[in-house]
Image: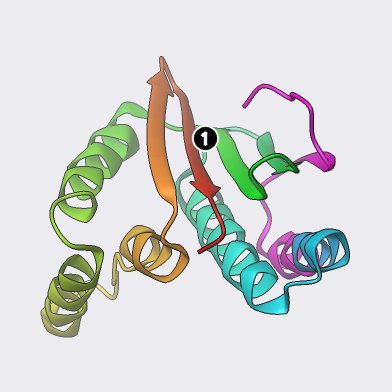
Amino acid sequence: MEITNSLGFIEIKFGPRWKYIAVVRAFIQNFIAVSYSDNIRADKIAMAASELLENAVKYAQGEETLVKLQLLPETESIMVSVTNRANLEAIKGLQEIWEKVMQGDPLQAYITQMQLAATRTDSKSQLGLVRIRYETGADMKLDVQGDMVTISLTQSPK
């Protein structure tokens, strides 16, 4: 995500640890709420960042996870991305899930994935990305460059 004319932006880089997710989520939520005075939107974007960070902690290879958040005043859009390294197996799995998540209506994709999650025996719901797509209404993008994976989303006000 390239930083352009923005109301504000943050970049946070850390070792992927579970204990940091709640702190980063709260920081993002407060940053957006102060900038846009919209707690509902702040909650949705913070949830999305939290889901992406959980995936980074689960599947990251290496110690570096990068979170970027940018507020764009012209369109009142919010851009969030999470970047981390992953092994080939995790990347292939993500690409397969991504194809399912991005197909069709967001609500129907969410319902379908919830039904699948209820029957899984491996305790992996795989609801994170489909939940983000449905609940935020954001445009989402997956970018893989070698072993670097970036998932970004841009959410505009409704």
> Where in the figure is residue 150, as x and y percent of width and height?
49, 32
Secondary structure category for the residue under label 1: loop
> Where in the figure is residue 85, as x and y percent of width and height?
52, 30
- Marks counted in the figure total 1
144 in relation to 37, above or below: above
64 in relation to 53, above or below: above
Specify whether 22 is left or right of 113.
Answer: right
- 75 or 134, which is in the foreground? 75
Instruction: Kindly identify the residue that appears in the image at 54 percent across and 61 percent down.
Output: 48
Specify whether 45 is left or right of 106.
Answer: right
Determine the residue located farthest toward the top in the rendered image.
146
| Quarter of the N terminus within the rendering | top right
Q: Quadrant of residue 141?
A: top left
Look at label 1 and name its amino acid: Gln
Q: Within the magenta stretch, is there residue 4?
A: yes
> Where in the figure is residue 100, as x and y percent of width and height?
15, 52
Specify whether 23 is left or right of 128.
Answer: right
**In the rendered image, which residue does mark 1 sit on?**
61
Instruction: Kindly identify the residue that appears in the image at 67 percent across and 50 percent down.
Output: 76
Local packing at callout 1 (Cα closer than 10 Å; few below 14, some 14-19, many 20+) is some
Magenta segment boundaries in residue numbering: 1-26
> Where in the figure is residue 18, as x and y percent of width and height?
66, 63
90 in relation to 118, above or below: above
Determine the residue located farthest toward the bottom in the rendered image.
118
Q: Within the magenta stretch, is there residue 83?
A: no
Instruction: Kindly identify the residue that appears in the image at 69 percent across and 68 percent down.
Output: 42
Instruction: Kindly identify the residue that appears in the image at 29 percent across and 64 percent down.
Output: 126
Q: Quadrant of residue 66?
A: top right
Q: Quadrant of residue 101?
A: bottom left
| Colour scheme of the picture | rainbow
